């Protein structure tokens, strides 16, 4: 696979507020985040020739990117809406690089914004068929199946799942913008009501409104811009694809294939990562993801968390913003923003900064671990 | 759930899909108390859900066979949250992924025992129950012996 070799960068990031954000439409979240990202980069809408988005999951409108472009008064050369669920956040970057590589665009904005907390949730309406007939509704129940299987296969405990919620909340307590900033103890975890056992309520991310945007361009173009560039060094995808209950092994995610590709692509490996931002819609997912990337052996994700090795200041800080579990339940785009800000040293002199961070990994996935994409970023020039 | 609640059967019945030309033998089988699966006559693969082609090899030469009705719990959850009115009387209830001896995995419920007593790897047998005069749904119970 051809390496990316510092040729593409993320040069601007932006987001709208987290939590409940009444009054801001889906379009408003996209537009506001994109304008913030352009300001951050020192660019204007006139510089943009590519607009890529993920469709807002809560209502699944068609041709979403064209509507976002219109709302920005941009007539793009490249415009597409991608559906890989959460993995789209990195899929958009892959599409952007492809377009730039082919000479079709130079400055591409990527965005994902939605308002399921205060707007409609029509696409989550109760389904019919086998799942409904069995009384299985919603993502927590399906992910809980993966958690139970992992517990049965590897001895993963409630305590260990609880440690994920506690660790990410600890990081969120250092994040003044996080949706949940109050510290969470293991006792709180165990007292949290059952949703779909083995999941308590706090094993699950909240439903949140927010928008995020990130801008991709060439290393050449980045030189003249406002922010130090963050280089995209590795990209990978891997899609387990089949419906969760029919998949070969429900304790394995797409991180295995997608991570291998991104590591190969970047010439780096797990040992080179200074931090990870991992899609953590439910507590079981970071465990499975860290295992599948090879940071720990299969089945050892739980003890890795239990030993606090993922805390800021530990050997591999994970989800330094609080992640989906505590910063915002928006499906993943804010993890890219957090990775970029860490690599810019945006939190310098505070506890939240991963000191000396040079290389970081972003994991995105969607469905019920149905899709997966991995990205390796660095602030180090070639 | 110990038994799909009688008071709730009409609410659950509303969740039944209308049988199609492709899956009608499955539903007819359940109502007669047996689990029928499609089998590919080309590669012998058993499949669920029913289709017009074989998921494994693509052949359209499919036949219906009566499954032995036995399977193993691959994973399960206990639902405590009120997600749907049809299940309110069942809370907390079991949802299981059952791996049938013939291969396919099916989402269903293990009934006749509290969900906390279900275990991954437990042997179960199909136990369809009528939800309407014309249609039954698939449930499982702990297998005997």
Image (spheres, grey):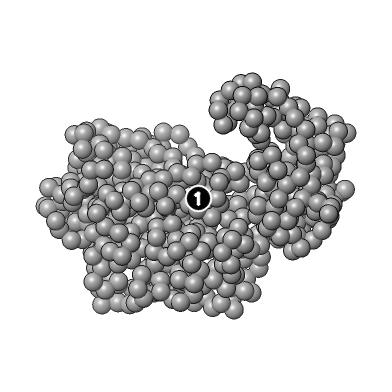
Quarter residue B53 falls in: top right
In the image, residue A1 sits, relative to residue A341, either above or below, namely above
Q: Residue at x 66, y 33 (%)?
A: B46
Q: Position of residue A150 (x, y in %)?
A: 57, 60
* Residue furthest to the top: B61
Q: Which residue is mark 1?
A: A369
Viewed as shown, does residue A179 lie left or right of A68?
Answer: right
Q: Is residue A319 visible?
A: no
Q: Residue at x 22, y 47 (%)?
A: A3
Q: Quadrant of the N terminus of chain B?
A: bottom right
Q: Position of residue A79 (x, y in %)?
A: 32, 35
Q: How many marks?
A: 1
Q: Position of residue A294 (x, y in %)?
A: 39, 60
Q: Residue at x 26, y 68 (%)?
A: A357
Helix, strand or loop at disc 1?
Answer: loop
In the image, residue A129 sits, relative to residue A338, either above or below, namely above
């Amino acid at each position: 696979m051809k390496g990316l070799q510092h040729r593409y960068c993320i040069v601007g990031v932006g987001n709208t507020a987290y939590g409940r954000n009444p009054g801001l439409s889906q379009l408003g979240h996209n537009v506001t985040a994109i304008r913030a990202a352009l300001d951050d980069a020192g660019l204007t809408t006139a510089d943009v020739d590519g607009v890529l988005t993920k469709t807002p999951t809560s209502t699944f409108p068609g041709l979403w990117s064209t509507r976002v472009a219109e709302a920005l008064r941009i007539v793009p050369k490249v415009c597409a809406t991608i559906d890989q669920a959460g993995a789209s956040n990195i899929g958009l970057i892959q599409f952007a690089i492809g377009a730039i590589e082919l000479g079709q665009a130079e400055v591409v904005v990527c965005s994902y914004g939605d308002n399921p907390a205060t707007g409609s949730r029509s696409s989550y309406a109760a389904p019919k068929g086998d799942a409904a007939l069995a009384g299985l509704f919603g993502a927590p129940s399906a992910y809980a199946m993966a958690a139970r299987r992992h517990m049965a296969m590897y001895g993963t405990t409630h305590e260990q799942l609880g440690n994920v919620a506690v660790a990410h909340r600890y990081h969120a307590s250092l994040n003044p913008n996080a949706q949940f900033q109050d510290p969470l103890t293991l006792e709180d975890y165990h007292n949290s009501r059952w949703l779909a056992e083995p999941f308590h309520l706090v094993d699950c991310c909240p439903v949140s409104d927010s928008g995020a945007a990130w801008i991709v361009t060439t290393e050449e173009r980045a030189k003249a811009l406002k922010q130090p560039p963050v280089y995209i060094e590795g990209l990978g995808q891997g899609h387990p694809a089949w419906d969760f209950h029919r998949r070969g092994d429900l304790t394995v995610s797409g991180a295995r294939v997608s991570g291998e590709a991104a590591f190969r692509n970047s010439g780096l490996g797990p040992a080179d990562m200074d931090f990870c931002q991992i899609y953590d819609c439910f507590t079981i997912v970071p465990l499975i993801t860290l295992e599948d990337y090879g940071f720990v052996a299969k089945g050892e994700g739980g003890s890795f968390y239990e030993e606090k090795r993922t805390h800021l200041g530990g050997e591999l800080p994970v989800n330094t913003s609080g992640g989906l579990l505590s910063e915002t339940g928006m499906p993943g785009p804010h993890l890219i923003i957090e990775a970029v800000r860490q690599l810019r040293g945006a939190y310098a002199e505070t506890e939240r900064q991963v000191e000396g961070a040079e290389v970081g990994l972003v994991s995105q996935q969607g469905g019920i671990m149905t899709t997966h994409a991995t990205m390796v970023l660095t602030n180090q020039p070639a | 759930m110990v038994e799909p609640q009688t008071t709730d059967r009409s609410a659950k019945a509303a969740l039944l899909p209308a049988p199609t030309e492709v899956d009608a033998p499955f539903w007819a089988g359940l109502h007669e108390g047996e689990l029928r699966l499609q089998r590919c006559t080309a590669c012998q693969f058993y499949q669920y859900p029913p289709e017009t082609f074989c998921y494994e090899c693509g052949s359209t030469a499919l036949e219906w066979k009566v499954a032995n009705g036995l399977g193993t719990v691959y994973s399960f959850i206990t639902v405590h949250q009120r997600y749907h009115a049809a299940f309110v009387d069942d809370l907390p209830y079991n949802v299981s992924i059952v791996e049938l001896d013939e291969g396919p995995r099916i989402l269903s419920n293990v009934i006749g025992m509290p969900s906390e007593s279900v275990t991954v790897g437990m042997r179960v047998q199909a136990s369809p129950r009528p939800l309407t005069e014309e249609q039954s749904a698939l449930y499982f119970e702990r297998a005997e012996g």
